Image (tube, rainbow, N blue to C red):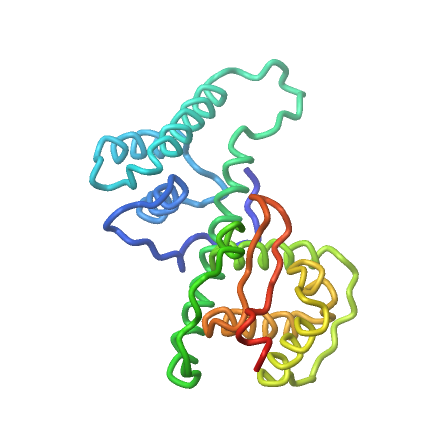
Amino acid sequence: MAPSSIETSKNYEVNLGVFQGPLDLLLFLIRKKKIDINDIPIAIITKEYLTYLDKKDKINIANEGQFLLTAALLIYIKSRMLLPSQSENEDETDPRQSLVHRLLDYQKIKAACEILRDKENEFLPKWHRTFLPPLPTSDDLELIEVSLFDLAECFFTLMKRKEKENIRLIHGKEYSIENKMNEMVSILKEKGYLDFIEYFELHESLEEALVSFFCLLELIKSGIVFAVQEKLFHSIKIWLRKEASNE
């Protein structure tokens, strides 16, 4: 497979205690073997992967089905690569391509989560929680509350999609965190809720989108707002808690 401009997993960190998912394990093996993520030797990785799969204490048993499914995919790719090409002139798609794309996307999401975690640790001493968030009401329990990882994944996907658009970026403009938080709360008081994707699609620059996203995380952490989905894979909506709307 042709090399890509995207860096390999040199900055990827993994918890060696238990691998949470198959992509965690695959990225660890790629780094351990010092392999180019764009040119994975499937036979070597498959052998190493199956060896780790036998170590039940190294994988999250709750996700064992995902580990087995990925093992079957590796074996399938290995068998595809062992078969001779039907025609020497035929431009066949590399059977590893789909797996490589998944690994690269997952690696980016993990890197984005690390950045958000570092930012949280940096600002945590500065932003103090002044009150405990109220317990969820019966209305809240009827909805699916969105995790911070889901929000980060959705935000990353949205920014990746906007990279392909012809957007005029505004440079040199500073965005106030306090003003952004007040702006979001004002919109919520006026309209009732924010559609996560629609709100961030209105931002003209990456800087403004990042500031807004960090502000949203802080509002969630402070219990002022909460993010929910009506059903899995539905749009994410941001709501203002009743206690905050009265303040």
Q: Quadrant of the C terminus?
A: bottom right
Q: Nearer the viewer, residue 105 or 229?
A: 229
Q: Nearer the viewer, residue 246 or 102?
A: 246
Relative height, residue 175 to residue 195 (above, below) = below
Residue 118 drawn at (x, y percent): 41, 71
The residue drawn where x is 48% and y is 39% is: 39
Residue 134 drawn at (x, y percent): 44, 69
Numbered disc total: 0
Relative height, residue 137 to residue 65 (above, below) = below
The residue drawn where x is 55% and y is 75% is: 215
Q: Nearer the viewer, residue 203 or 216?
A: 216
In the rendered view, does 204 fall on the left or right side of 44? Answer: right
In the rendered view, does 181 fall on the left or right side of 24? Answer: right
Image quadrant of residue 23?
top left
Residue 43 drawn at (x, y percent): 37, 28
Q: Nearer the viewer, residue 34 or 73?
A: 73
The residue drawn where x is 62% and y is 46% is: 234
Image quadrant of residue 174?
bottom right
Relative height, residue 175 to residue 109 (above, below) = below
Relative height, residue 82 to residue 53 (above, below) = above
Residue 163 drawn at (x, y percent): 69, 59
The residue drawn where x is 69% and y is 84% is: 172
Q: Quadrant of the N terminus?
A: top right
